[in-house]
Image (spheres, helix red, strand yellow):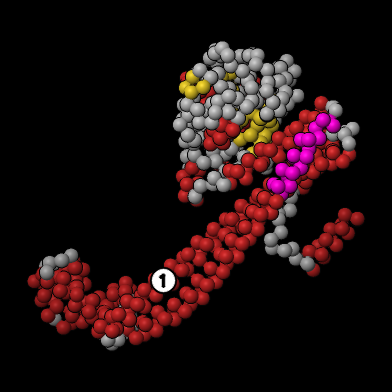
């Protein structure tokens, strides 16, 4: 009864006060439940942490996983609306220019031959003259008069009935094609009326485009303000990590910080966003992930039913140096590791290097289509000072292509490595496969990755995968 009363009262409120048009979409029940469960899980991991510090970590998590994605969606929608409004304004302006040109041309004709000049009859005369000279217009007049050749046509034209019929038909054709159904004076008045209407429409569309552009700018500023807040909180929390005593709390905080760090890359990438046509070209190509987005932090990959307790943990953050010992090589097709290499991240291969770690990198610049998984993997490897090739193929091809160039490839995950997905693996493209960058190896053996994809339109997302040893990894 209480639930029913609350529902009815909410209905009355909704009728009395309709929601603003610009309001964000209400999260679904499942989304709210998932968000609540995630928050409770994080709170549990931060048990025993100073309450003020724990709250800051929870706030950053909410900012990164809820507030910023919602603001990003609103900014994208506003930008699309602004682009559409501008296209409408441009079209209205073009129609106005065309009408003004029609008016100018007609005024010139009136000045030359008067406002009572019969354009329809002039069109017939022109067709006749062209026919006498053997032009293609004879075909037109033949259809009108039924003549089979020039002689027949001349005879037909000598008949007043045929001439009348020809003039009438040609005049109708000319009227349809050239708007000559009215005399010049009436046509000029009609064009002037049309110009008045088009001016009003063009002004209205221009105002709408300006308003839409201002709204898009406001939404972008709101998004950037949230990201500024995230950067500030992330900086503060990084300085407070020493207060975290338990391994569980440290890992939970590090993952929250890493998620925020990855999201910060999206602002940098926005400045490199290509034109709409380039985006269409990129998204029509290969190398993309077709997996539906589950938001910035998705967990679409189910934990493996088998345990990973027998695997080495190798847990570390994305910016720490790791052990230089060689990991177990689980792939029979892996190439042997040259001596003198290690797994330090960041590496020692400067961005754009064509040769490092004892082999050619195949790097001649980012040749991958914008927003694709391969596009981001190329960018991220450069950020980490790790080698990367420009033509390693679709996602599923990266392991074999890199091996041929001399890269060390195996089935052991490590921070900074390119994680290779087979076609259709973990819900990715059944044709092209997928690639992602390993950002962290968690204590439970799962891997935290950053990834691109055409469905994310130039934004970077992150995910946690629970089947790490079922993939190939391109190291260096």
| 374 sits left or right of 222 in the view | left
The answer to whether residue 360 is visible is: yes
Which stretch did the figure color magenta? 226-244
Q: Residue at x 47, y 64 (%)?
A: 90
- Residue under label 1, please give it: 97
Locate residue 98, reporting x and y percent.
39, 71
Locate residue 18, reporting x and y percent.
75, 66
Q: Residue at x 74, y 39 (%)?
A: 235
> Within the image, what quadrant is residue 451 found in?
top right
Q: Relative to residue 277, is residue 204 depicted above or below?
A: below
Q: Residue at x 71, y 35 (%)?
A: 258
> Within the image, what quadrant is residue 457 found in?
top right
Q: Relative to residue 281, is residue 87 depicted above or below?
A: below
Locate residue 214, reporting x and y percent.
61, 62
Residue at the extreme left of the image, as rendered: 151
The answer to whether residue 61 is visible is: no
| 36 sits left or right of 352 in the view | right
Dot 1 falls on a residue whose secondary structure is helix
Q: What is the quadrant of the N terminus in the image?
A: bottom right
């Amino acid at each position: 009864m209480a639930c029913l009363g609350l529902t009815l009262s909410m209905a009355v409120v909704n009728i009395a006060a309709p929601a603003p048009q610009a309001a964000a979409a209400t999260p679904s029940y499942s989304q709210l439940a998932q968000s609540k469960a995630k928050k409770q899980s994080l709170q549990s991991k931060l048990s025993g942490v100073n309450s003020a510090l724990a709250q800051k970590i929870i706030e950053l998590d909410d900012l990164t996983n809820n507030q910023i994605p919602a603001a990003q969606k609103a900014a994208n929608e506003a930008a699309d609306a602004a682009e559409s409004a501008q296209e409408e304004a441009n079209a209205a302006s073009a129609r106005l220019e065309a009408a003004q040109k029609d008016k100018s041309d007609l005024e010139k004709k009136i000045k030359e031959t008067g406002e009572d000049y019969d354009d329809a009859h002039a069109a017939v005369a022109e067709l006749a003259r062209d026919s006498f000279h053997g032009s293609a217009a004879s075909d037109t007049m033949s259809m009108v008069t039924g003549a089979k050749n020039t002689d027949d046509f001349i005879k037909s034209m000598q008949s007043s009935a045929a001439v009348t019929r020809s003039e009438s038909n040609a005049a109708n054709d000319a009227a349809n094609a050239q708007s000559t159904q009215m005399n010049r004076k009436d046509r000029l008045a009609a064009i002037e009326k049309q110009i008045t209407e088009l001016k009003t429409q063009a002004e209205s569309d221009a105002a709408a485009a300006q308003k839409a552009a201002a709204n898009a700018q406001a939404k972008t500023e709101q998004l950037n303000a949230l990201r500024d807040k995230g950067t500030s909180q992330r900086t503060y929390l990084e300085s407070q990590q020493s207060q975290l005593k338990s391994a569980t709390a440290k890992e939970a905080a590090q993952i929250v910080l890493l998620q925020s760090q990855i999201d910060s890359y999206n602002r940098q990438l926005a400045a490199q966003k290509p034109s709409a046509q380039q985006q269409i070209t990129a998204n029509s190509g290969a190398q993309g992930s077709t997996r539906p987005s589950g938001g910035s932090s998705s967990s679409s990959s189910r934990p493996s039913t088998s345990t990973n307790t027998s695997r080495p943990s190798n847990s570390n953050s994305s910016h720490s140096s790791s052990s230089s010992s060689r990991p177990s090589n689980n792939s029979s097709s892996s190439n042997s590791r040259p001596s003198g290499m290690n797994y330090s991240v960041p590496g020692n291969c400067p961005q754009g290097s064509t040769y490092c770690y004892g082999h050619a990198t195949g790097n001649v610049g980012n040749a991958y289509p914008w927003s694709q998984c391969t596009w981001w993997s190329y960018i991220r490897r450069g950020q980490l000072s790790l080698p990367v090739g420009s033509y390693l193929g679709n996602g599923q091809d990266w392991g074999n292509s890199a091996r041929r160039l001399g890269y060390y490839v195996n089935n052991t995950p490590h921070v900074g490595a390119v994680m290779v997905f087979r076609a259709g693996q973990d819900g990715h493209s059944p044709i092209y496969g997928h690639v992602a960058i390993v950002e962290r190896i968690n204590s439970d053996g799962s891997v935290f990755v950053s990834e691109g994809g055409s469905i994310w339109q130039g934004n970077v997302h992150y995910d946690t995968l629970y089947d790490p040893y079922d993939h190939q990894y391109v190291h260096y």
